[in-house]
Structure formats: structure tokens, C-alpha cells
Image (spheres, rainbow, N blue to C red):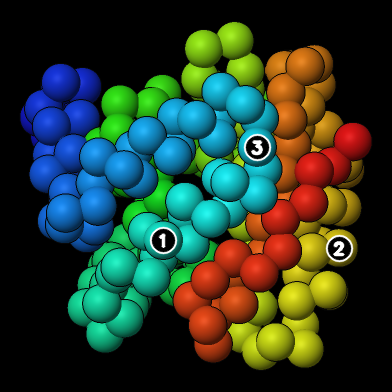
Amino acid sequence: SLDYPNTEVLNAMSKLLTQNFVENDYNYLQEDLRYSLQERDNEGLKDVFNTLLASIPYDDYKSAAKQGIQLQHLKIPVQEWLYRTSILAFLRGCGIIVEAELHTFKGRPDLVISYRDTIFIIENKVAGKSEEVQAKLTEAETQIREKEYIKPYPNAICLAMVIDDTQRQIVRCEEVK
């Protein structure tokens, strides 16, 4: 059987990883994250995530993600997995309650974030080319609606985010009603 570290250890590991990603800007980025979550500022949240994504060496984490997916025989795009995992580790490192691929009655949103009295449900899609951004946004919005991700969390904020893989940045972030 596998022994998994407890939550405290996972959070400490995520914090160290996060601090290494963003080096000296960790405290500012953590403050911006908490402010954006508290104020329900979707654009601010996108900016925080983009700062994180811009701090990660492309070759290192793309290779690691590809290897991890191959070893686990997962059938998800490499880029989507690595972006979600980077954001997940960052959020946990900042002490935010977050779950990835949390099962609901119809599907699994990429991230479910709980901060104070607010739940954020995030569905990420990765566009391989800039021309695919609108199609990926529509795909994320449709998935959120069809899978009824909001149903278990009636007052949640559902966000469809599109990451342009050529820029390694979130280029669209839309709230889905």
C-alpha cells in the first residue's frame, strides 16, 4: 500500500514549490490572490495565475508533465494537465482550499476553490494556436453548463478559462451564468 503524506506536509511542499516558482514575489502574489478571491475579481485572479505561469520554465515543466501522463496512462492533453497542476500547487502553497477534478454528479471540473464564503469553479481549456481560443472558450462554457458544475454549489462563481499554449498565458476568462 502507498503511504500518502498528510495534508500539512502536502501544503508545506506546495508552499515551497510555489515560493521557488515566484521567488521574491511570493508574498505579493499571495496577497493579490487572496484579494482577488475575496473581492471576486476574475480579472485579478487571471492576472495572478498568469504571473505564476510566466514564472515557470517552459522546458522543465512541459517535459515533466508529459512524462507523468505517459507513466500514468492518462488520456488528457499534456498542456491542460500541467497548467492545472501548476495552478493547483500554487493555490495550495498559498493556503487556499482547492480540489482538482472533484467528482460531481455529471462530471469533474478542473478546479474547485473555496475561499471564505465563496466557491469558484474553474474549467480550463488549452488552445494550441491563437485561432482556437474562441472555440476553446465555447467548449469550456458548454462543459460547465452541460455538466451542471454549479448545481452542488448554487452560489458559486463558474469561470471558463482559456490558456493560449503559444503564449503560456490565460487569454480569456469568462464567468458562466
Q: Quick check: 46 above or below 114?
A: below
**117, 11: nearer the viewer:** 117
Query: Which quadrant does the C terminus fall into?
Result: top right
Numbered tag placed on residue 41 in the rendering: 3
Q: Viewed as shown, does residue 121 lie left or right of 141?
A: left
* Label 2 vs label 3, nearer the camera: 3
Q: Earlier in the sequence, mark 2 or mark 3?
A: 3
Lateral position of residue 158 relative to residue 121, left or right: right
Q: Secondary structure at mark 3?
A: loop
- The mark that comes first in sequence, 1 or 2, is 1
Q: Position of residue 128 (x, y in %)?
A: 62, 85
* Residue 45 occupies quadrant: top right
Mark 3, residues whose alpha carbon is within 10 Å: few (<14), some, or many (≥20)?
few
Residue density around tag 1, few if under 14, some if 14–19, many if 20 or more, within 10 Å: some
User: What residue sits 65% from the left and 49% below the top?
Assistant: 43
Q: Spatial distance from mark 1 to mark 2, Cα to Cα?
A: 24 Å
| Disc 2 residue type (three-letter) | Thr
Name the mark nearer the viewer: 1 or 2: 1
The answer to whether any part of residue 164 appears in the image is yes
Q: Secondary structure at mark 1?
A: helix
Residue type pointed to by label 1:
Thr
